[in-house]
Amino acid sequence: MIVELLQELIRNRCVNDGTPESGQEVRSVATIADLLGERGVVVEPLPGRQSVIYRVPGTNPESPALLLLPHLDVVPANPAGWEVDPFAAEITDGFVWGRGAIDMLNVTAAMLVVFGEFWRGARAPLPGDLILAAVADEEAAGRLGARYLVEESLDLVDAPFVLTEVGYPALPSPVGLIYPVAVGEKGPFWTKVKSSGTPGHGSTPFGADNALAALVAGVGRLFDAESPVTMTDVWTSLVLALGFGPDLAERLLDPEQLDGAIEDLAVEDPLLARYFHAITHLTISPNVLRGGIKANMIPDQAVAELDIRALPGTDRTTVNEVLRKLMGAPGEKLELEPVADHLSYFSGRDNPLWEAVAASFFDHTGSNRLQPVTIPATTDARFFRSRGAVAYGVGLYDDQLTFGEFLALFHGHNERVSIDSLHKTTDLLRSTLHHFGHLTA
């Protein structure tokens, strides 16, 4: 059942390219209605951009509610880079292949299966309400999904505890495998950098006021610039848990030596090094560049779009100051336009949901070695953490993909998840809810 459900969600092609008319999560909302036997409360800010909410009332009004928060949309995929059709949901070598297989339709399917057991009465209700909010638009900042629900219909989704994306494969350590649980994420500070010039004929470029010139000169500096370092407690605990040699561990925990240590690590494990860099730095990635109308016209307008992710302690003022400093003199003429601003939030671990997650991992792995980790990207959890809720991303995976290989599949080619991991994650969620019920009775 879980495999077929994931395949259908992939084949629904809820591709979110950032435009209001994309996504069309209505297709997967229909899939959920078929699975659960009826429609939940549908919220539709724009045609086809649907989120759906279901609730199983608890038995004790004093007990806390738990929200399951999967998203239904996926990012685009270029078929030319794939070994298979990214929306065929083929099964090959024990894996389901397709866009969204790990971001996050695998966990979405697992949550739907487990929630369905409570919805149909196959499992006794929890003491507190159990809420499912399958949302739209996570891949475009949640404006039409989780953010919209929190701002416009909070009563439907308000809960002090949240489970969402995303779990990771286990990491090796000197004392055995450690199991990552996402407790926080970086905040997005997406920014447009704009440049103005004077239009003219492309045949006479000498001395021209080309809008692209200043933009490329300023933004080009961002690719190789050393961005600020922030070391969180989560980072420190991860380095210590992984049991690196004393010299490397010392360097990884020293802001002055960190970049060199990551470069050395990249020789052996470039994918893990990319992750380490992301969760310790203010990252700035220029990903879109637009300028000009025709090849024979000197452009008077140009814009670059930057994906900027920040750790706790960084706000918009700091981001703009860093951009100005890194772009130097060429950046003085450039305009900075905020696109998205959201602070970074982390959840603590002294609470019944963490205890439930830990007990569930012990049930299925025999290990109590949970490791808090940082998501370098952004999830809908931020809308709830910013209100004081505890939110974790969990999953349980087999060893067919390493931690780094798993990370590389996000928004990449040949995204896939093993069928074994699908079942493991479903079992983990099921027992997490079981333990949470006992701990909150």
Image: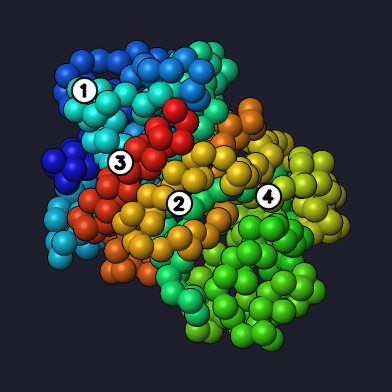
The residue identified by callout 2 is: 358
Query: For the residue labelled by badge 1, is the local secondary structure a helix, a strand or a loop?
Result: loop
Mark 1–mark 3 Cα distance, whole angstroms, equals 14 Å
Number of the label disc, if any, that sits on residue 439: none
Given the image, on which type of amino acid does mark 1 rest?
Gly
Given residues 87 and 432, the one toward you in this image is 432
Mark 1–mark 4 Cα distance, whole angstroms, equals 43 Å
Query: For the residue labelled by badge 4, is the local secondary structure a helix, a strand or a loop?
Result: strand
**Number of marks in picture:** 4
Of marks 4 and 3, the one in the foreground? 3
Given the image, on which type of amino acid does mark 3 rest?
Arg
> Where residue 9 sits in the image (x, y, percent)?
23, 37
Mark 2–mark 3 Cα distance, whole angstroms, equals 13 Å
The residue identified by callout 4 is: 310
* Callout 4 touching callout 3 (CB < 8 Å): no
* Callout 4 touching callout 2 (CB < 8 Å): no
Given the image, on which type of amino acid does mark 4 rest?
Ala
The residue identified by callout 1 is: 121
